[in-house]
């Protein structure tokens, strides 16, 4: 007498003599081909219940040719294990693994359901109401309800797939992506929760003819939300606006933690408190030196014939009646003034102002500059350090609109910009990690990139990435 077919929801670890009628809805391979390759899959039964299945190297050589995504099978005799790994593909308490006596037979069962996406609301992620070890489905450039914004990082081939779409596909429609088996990351400090693809598990669909994407597009149309593209050169806006939050001056004054943000303001005053406009420093590490005898050796190990003068200028900035103090270091001052500090000091001395603390006329060139600033608020030092600035309208205007729409407006149809930025998990301007990630071995799902680098040739482009303005 043949065994009665089991249901996935009845799998409780009490027996392994299972007989399942299933469809493979997801199938992927990890490891090195013909050396350590494994197959992992998600199967679904007639009730729509799912479970994660693993076929390791010793069994894969027998079954690889037969295993195909979306086909239906009858499976016998799988080892039942606790689904308690670092990351879980399915929410089932158990997972299955092929053994030496596993039997897999193709069988036409059209009644078995195909893959159904189980979406998680953006609001759920933003509120951190999720299990970090469970990979989930996700859709969107943005979510309709409230138009919440969520940061998404694409790794390795997923990043290249997205860049290829931007560079090669002529499509004026808004970019709607469907990303499966998403990794959810908890917020860290001032940085909100975010999502990223899993290295091998995720599938990325961009504006494809998928029912869920079409329905999402129709919902945009039904709500009367039109999206048009706003072009920005690659690199400039992406670096300036990536991994930061917009703040206005009033909000910056109220910050009590260390945070990196962007804002817009006009420089109105040079502040001369207890610090001079420049300082003597080591030529290598930029640290201030009080050594009066030369030559000298800096604590960093650099031998200096003479100290090098560097800018350190505090300024008052103002926007919409609110003001605060920013600290400009040597690079930013030299760019704004257009002269190195040694040249400015030499001309000052030639005009008769020999005291180093006497401020030069050249400093006034920064006054009246209306700029977009990327700043680091250091509340414990009671200062706001300028990391980068821009006088380009392509950055100033979006910063102004982001500030007014994302921070002040409660009307979701007023959201001005949605940014698609090519970023990594560190900010090259800060040289500190912003969203550190744990590296995993292939046995731990092979779910994080390992020493991955994208060559300049792969990320370079003559096209402009599309950013979206909601009208």
Image (tube, rainbow, N blue to C red):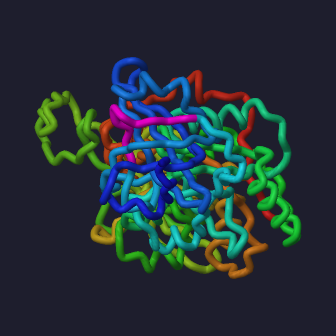
> Is the stretch drawn in magenta largely helix, strand or loop?
strand
Left or right: where 84 falls relative to 130: left
Query: What residue is rendered at 63% in x and 34% in y?
Result: 161
Given residues 166 and 279, the one toward you in this image is 166
Residue at coordinates 27% horizontally, 34% vertically from top-left? 283
**Total marks in image:** 0
Q: Is residue 253 above or below residue 196?
A: below
**Residue 150 percent location from the top left of the image:** 58, 62
The residue that appears at 71% across and 35% down in the rendered structure is 165
Residue plotted at (70% across, 66% down): 401
x then y, percent, for residue 231: 76, 45
Task: Please say whether residue 371 is visible from this viewpoint.
Answer: no
Residue closest to the eye, 83 or 163: 83
* Magenta highlight on residue 85: no
Which image quadrant for residue 281?
top left
Residue 91: % across, % down: 45, 61
Tell me the quadrant of the picture where the C terminus can be found: bottom right
Q: Is residue 323 visible?
A: yes
| Left or right, residue 322 beside residue 300 | right
Q: Is residue 131 left or right of residue 141?
A: left
Residue 87: give x, y in percent of width and height.
37, 52
Q: Looking at this rendering, what residue extends furthest in the top direction?
A: 34
Bounds of the magenta segment: 96-105
């Amino acid at each position: 007498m043949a065994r009665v077919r089991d249901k996935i929801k009845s799998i409780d670890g009490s027996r392994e003599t299972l007989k399942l009628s299933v469809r493979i809805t997801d199938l992927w391979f990890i490891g090195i081909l013909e050396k350590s390759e494994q197959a992992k899959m998600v199967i679904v039964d007639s009730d729509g219940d799912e479970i994660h299945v693993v076929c390791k190297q010793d069994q894969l050589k027998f079954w690889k040719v037969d295993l195909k995504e979306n086909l239906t099978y009858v499976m016998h005799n799988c080892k039942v294990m606790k689904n308690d790994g670092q990351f879980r593909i399915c929410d089932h308490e158990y997972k299955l693994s092929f053994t030496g006596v596993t039997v897999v037979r193709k069988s036409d069962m059209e009644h078995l359901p195909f893959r159904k996406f189980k979406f998680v609301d953006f609001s759920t992620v933003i509120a951190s109401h999720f299990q970090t070890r469970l990979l989930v489905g996700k859709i969107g450039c943005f979510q309709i309800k409230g138009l919440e914004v969520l940061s998404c990082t694409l790794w390795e081939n997923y990043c290249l797939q997205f860049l290829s779409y931007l560079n090669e596909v002529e499509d004026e429609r808004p970019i709607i992506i469907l990303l499966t088996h998403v990794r959810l990351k908890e917020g860290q400090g001032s940085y909100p929760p975010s999502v990223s693809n899993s290295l091998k598990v995720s599938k990325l669909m961009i504006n494809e003819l998928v029912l869920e994407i079409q329905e999402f597009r129709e919902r945009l149309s039904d709500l009367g939300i039109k999206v048009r593209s706003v072009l920005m050169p690659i690199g400039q806006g992406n670096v300036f606006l990536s991994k930061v939050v917009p703040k206005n001056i009033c909000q910056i004054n109220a910050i009590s933690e260390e945070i990196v943000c962007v804002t817009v303001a006009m420089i109105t005053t040079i502040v001369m408190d207890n610090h001079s406009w420049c300082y003597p420093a080591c030529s290598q590490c930029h640290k201030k030196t009080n050594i009066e005898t030369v030559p000298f050796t800096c604590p960093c190990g650099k031998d200096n014939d003479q100290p090098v003068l560097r800018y350190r200028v505090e300024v008052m900035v103002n926007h919409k009646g609110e003001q605060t103090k920013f600290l400009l270091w040597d690079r930013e001052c030299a760019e704004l003034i257009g002269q190195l500090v040694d040249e400015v000091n030499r001309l000052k001395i030639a005009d008769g102002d020999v005291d180093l603390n006497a401020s030069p006329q050249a400093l006034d060139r920064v006054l009246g500059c209306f700029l977009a600033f990327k700043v680091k608020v250091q509340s414990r030092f009671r200062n706001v350090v300028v990391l980068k600035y821009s006088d380009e309208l392509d950055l100033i205007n979006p910063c102004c609109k982001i500030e007014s729409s994302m921070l002040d407006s409660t009307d979701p149809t007023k959201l001005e910009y949605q940014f698609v930025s090519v970023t990594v998990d560190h900010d090259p301007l800060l040289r500190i990690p912003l969203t550190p990630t744990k590296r995993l071995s292939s046995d731990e799902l092979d779910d994080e990139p390992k020493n991955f680098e994208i060559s300049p040739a792969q990320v370079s482009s003559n096209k402009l990435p599309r950013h979206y303005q909601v009208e």
